Image (cartoon, rainbow, N blue to C red):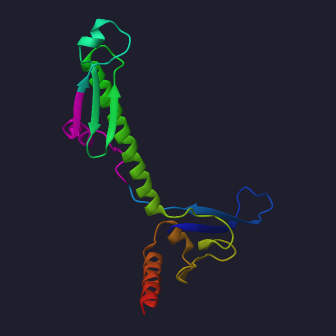
Amino acid sequence: EKGAHRLVRISPFNAQGKRMTTFAAVDVSPILDLDVGNGDELVSIESECTITTMRSGGAGGQNVNKVESGVRVVHEPSGINVKVTQERGQARNKKIAMDRVKSMILALMEEARVEEVQKINGDLVEATWGAQVRNYVLNPDKRVKDLRSGWETTDAAGVLDGNLDDVVESVLVARAREVQDIHS
């Protein structure tokens, strides 16, 4: 169903009762899990990390030279490396470092999801003359024609109400023929 669909009808908004043509770009994509990175994936992240401590260094008095409050977290699978020395306590630095690693992993997961969606969707559809995949003509005669398969019906109201089994079947048969012709 992906493609430009053309609708020809008498517009209820035109006082002169003229025929109007409207285009709609239709894009169909699967429903994906949008809760990427929430919960299970990030709960076990600490087991995939190497956590080391160090002295923070810099100005700050004797505490800086005695206590290992700095934390470095390396996420082994992704290679993400975060070093935090901004707080005086190791526990707070560790939490900040883990939060940064989690946010970086979420960003990587989101990039991968976007790439997956783009791969599924393909190129953008232009709703213009000559690019349509199906025409719905409601005036003067009622007719729907799929330009990919050549399928045509005069039951325009039925197609617009969702009776798409015949047209989908004709498109699938046409695609199967194209694939068969390519491999022949």
Above or below for 111 versus 67: below
Q: Is residue 81 left or right of residue 153?
A: left
Which x, y percent locates residue 51? 23, 31
Q: Is residue 95 above or below residue 32?
A: above
Query: What residue is drawn where x is 67% and y is 66%?
Result: 128
Identify which residue, 4 or 122, lies in the foreground.
Answer: 122
Task: Determine if the magenta segment contains residue 41.
Answer: yes
Picture coordinates of residue 67, whole percent (x, y) = 23, 14
Q: Position of residue 116 (x, y in %)?
A: 41, 57
State the extent of the magenta-drawn residues as a range.
Answer: 32-52
Query: Is-magenta flag for residue 150?
Result: no
Q: Quadrant of residue 176?
A: bottom left
Give the position of the C terminus as an image quadrant: bottom left
Camera-side residue of 5 and 20: 5
Residue 78 appears in which quarter of the rendering? top left
Question: Residue at 42% of width from left, 75% of height from top?
Answer: 165
